[in-house]
Amino acid sequence: MPHIGLIFTGFTGNLNSSLEVAYRLKSEGHKITCLSVLDLKEQIERYDLAYVQLPPIKLSLSTENLGRLQNLSWIKKFLFHLENKERIIKDGNKLLGLDVYEKIISDLHIDKVLIDKELHDLIFVCYALKIPTTILSTWFSNKMGNGTKLPPLRSDIIPNKGIKGSALGILFNWIYIKIKVQFRIFLNNLTFKGYRRAALLRYAKENGFPTDTLIATNLPIFFSYTNLPFISFTMAEMDFPHQPERNFYYAGPMVHEKRKMMLNITENNLLDNILRLKEHSRKKLIYCAASSLLDPDLSFLKKVISAVEEKDEWMLIISLGGKLPPNRLETESSNVHIIYWVPQMKVLEHTDCCITHAGNNSVNECIHFSVPMLAYSGKKFDQNGCAARIHYHGLGIRGDKDKDDALQIRKNIKRIFEEPSFKEKMNFFHRKYREYGQRKLTPLLA
C-alpha cells in the first residue's frame, strides 16, 4: 500500500473530517502521515497517527513582508509598489516559504497526497514534486459545467424554483459571481494586494502546472482545479440532480465518531445534568449551534431564545462555539441553556431539532444522528447552498436569519416536531450515509 500524506488546514470541522479519512485509510492498510499548517501535534498524536508540523501559510505578501511601509505617505507607498512589484512576485517562492514546504514534504517520501482545497501553496508544491495529488473538500460541487444546472454554492437558489431557479436564472447568477470574482482580483491588483495570487501562479507555471485548468473562484479560495481529482465529503443523493464532473467523486460524510474531546469539567457536568433532565421530562430538545469559525450572530440567537423560552414542553441548548462568554446572552427561562462550547456529537445524539447555520460539517453530523434541521444560513462560504439542499430534500426547513422573527422561528420548530415527513426523510438519508460508510476509500485514490 502507498504512503499517503493527508494535509489539512486544522480548523475544527476540517480536522474532524480529516481524522475520519485517516482512520479509514489506515484501517484499509495504508501508511498515513498527517500534516497541518496549524499546531495540532498533541491532538493528532492522541489518535496514534504520525504527524508532521508545517509552517503557517503566509496569507499576504503585501502586509507581512512590506510592513515597514506603514508609516510612509500614500504616494511613497505607491511608488515603492510600482518599483518593486515584479521583484516581490518573482521572489514569491522564498517569501511564501514554498522552498521550506518542498524540503519537508520531499523528505517524507510520500507516494500520494490528499489535501484540503484551500491550501493552494501546498497543492502547487506537491505538483512540483511530482506527487499524485487529490483535492479534498467538505463542500458540494461548485462548478458551472454540465449545462449550468448547478447554481453557485454560495447562492440560495433551488433549481426549477422560481425565476432564479430557471436555467437562465442560474446562468445569470454564475455570470454575476464570476464578474464579482474578476472585479475583486482587479481591485486587489490595483491596490497591490494581489501579490500572493500572482506569486503562486508564477511558481505554478515555473513547475509545469497547467494554469489554464485553474478557475478563479470566490475569495478566500483562490482557485478551483479542473485537472486534479476532487473528493467531496458529501452524498450524491443530497446534491441537486446533475451530471458530476469526470474527476469529481462523492465519498459521503466523514463524521469522526471516536473523536477525543478535552472538556471543561464544569461545562461537561452542566451538560450531563441538562441531558438527564431531558430524558426524564421527555421534553423536546432543540440544539442551536453557533459557528466555531465566525463570531455568533447575537441578534439571531436572541430571537431563538424568545421563540423557545415560553414553551415549557421544549428545551433549548445554545452553543456559542467557544467565541463569546454566555453572559453576552440573557434569559430567565429555566428551559434555555447557554453554554460557551458544547461537544456537538454528544448533544446531537439527544436532539429532536437542530437549528443550524448550515455549515456542511454540522449538516453531516445531523444526518449521522437523524436529526431534522431548521436551517438558518449564516450566509457565508457554502452555507446558502447547504441550506437550499436541506430544504430541497425535505431534511428540514429553511428560514432567513435576518427576516424571520421569534414567532416565525417558533412556527418552524413546531412544524418540524409535528410533521413526520422531516424525520422520515432524515432517516432515509441516514441509511444512505451508512451505506457510504461501508465503502472503501482506496478505489477513489486510483
Image (tube, helix red, strand yellow):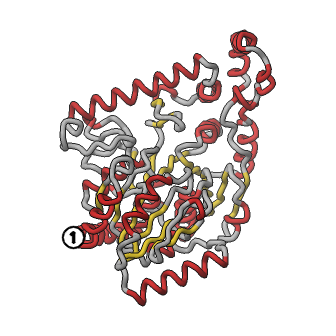
Tell me residue 433's x, y (percent).
36, 67
Q: Is residue 179 left or right of residue 14?
A: left
Can I make out residue 29 in this image?
no
Q: Quarter of the image for the N terminus: give it.
A: bottom right
In the picture as drawn, the residue positioned furthest to the bottom comes out as: 280
Q: Residue at x 64, y 20 (%)?
A: 192
Above/below status of 49 relative to 178: below
- Number of numbered discs present? 1
The reply, left or right, for residue 143 in relation to residue 182 is: left
Residue at image mark 1: 419
Q: Nearer the viewer, residue 245 or 364?
A: 364
Name the residue rendered at 78%, 21% in the picture.
Answer: 69
Circle 1 Cα neighbour tier, 10 Å, few/some/many (<14 / 14–19 / ≥20)? few
Is 155 on the left-hand or right-hand side of 40? Answer: left
Residue 277 percent location from the top left of the image? 46, 86
Q: Residue lying furthest front in this view?
A: 332
Of residues 443 and 42, the one nearer the viewer is: 42
Q: Residue 412's image quarter? A: bottom left
Q: In the image, residue 279 lies at what x, y percent?
A: 42, 86
The front one of 441 and 420 is 420
In the figure, 318 relative to 39: above or below? below
Q: Secondary structure at mark 1?
A: loop
The vertical placement of 32 against 58, above or below, is below
On screen, residue 140 versus residue 345, left or right, reads left
